[in-house]
Image (tube, rainbow, N blue to C red):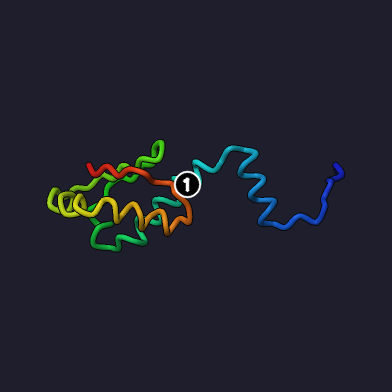
Amino acid sequence: MARRNNDNQSLQDALKQFVSTNNLQSGLDKVNVREAWAKLMGNGVNNYTTAIELKNETLYVQLNSSVLREELSYGKEKIITMLNESLGKDVVSKLVLR
């Protein structure tokens, strides 16, 4: 078995290092944005949400209700702010409702 150089690093620091070393942060952001959308919007909006995709700080949300899409379009900036606050960092800069 290979000997490891372990300088009493905390698990949190080890995981952060692993994520940054393997360039996994963008994938984690995509998953976290989906979870934040589901949590913040609730069942009413989630029932009409068919797809959520994060590409280059732009969140694409596909809805199967044109009425809901129009209603949410009035509060795009507030939704972006709520999502970023929930994630603890600026991940979403633009929201596109389809």
Q: Nearer the viewer, residue 81 or 17?
A: 81
Depth order, front residue of 75/3: 75
In the picture, the quarter occupied by the N terminus is top right
Instruction: Residue 20: give x, y in percent of width and height.
Output: 62, 42
Quadrant where the C terminus is found in the figure: top left
Image x and y of residue 64, in percent: 19, 47
Q: Nearer the viewer, residue 1 or 53?
A: 53
Residue 84 is situated, as x and y percent measured from the top left of the image, at 41, 53
The image quadrant of residue 25 is: top right
Left or right: 33, with 71 as reference point: right
Q: Is residue 64 left or right of residue 21?
A: left
Q: Is residue 82 left or right of residue 20?
A: left
Residue at 31% x, 42% y is: 60
x%, y% of residue 7?
Answer: 82, 52
**Residue assigned mark 1:** 29
Type of amino acid under label 1: Asp
With respect to residue 56, does 68 lie above or below?
below
Task: In the rendered view, tell whether residue 47 sits above or below residue 31.
Answer: below
Residue 35 found in image quarter = bottom left
Mark 1 crowd level (few <14, some 14–19, many ≥20, 10 Å Cα):
some
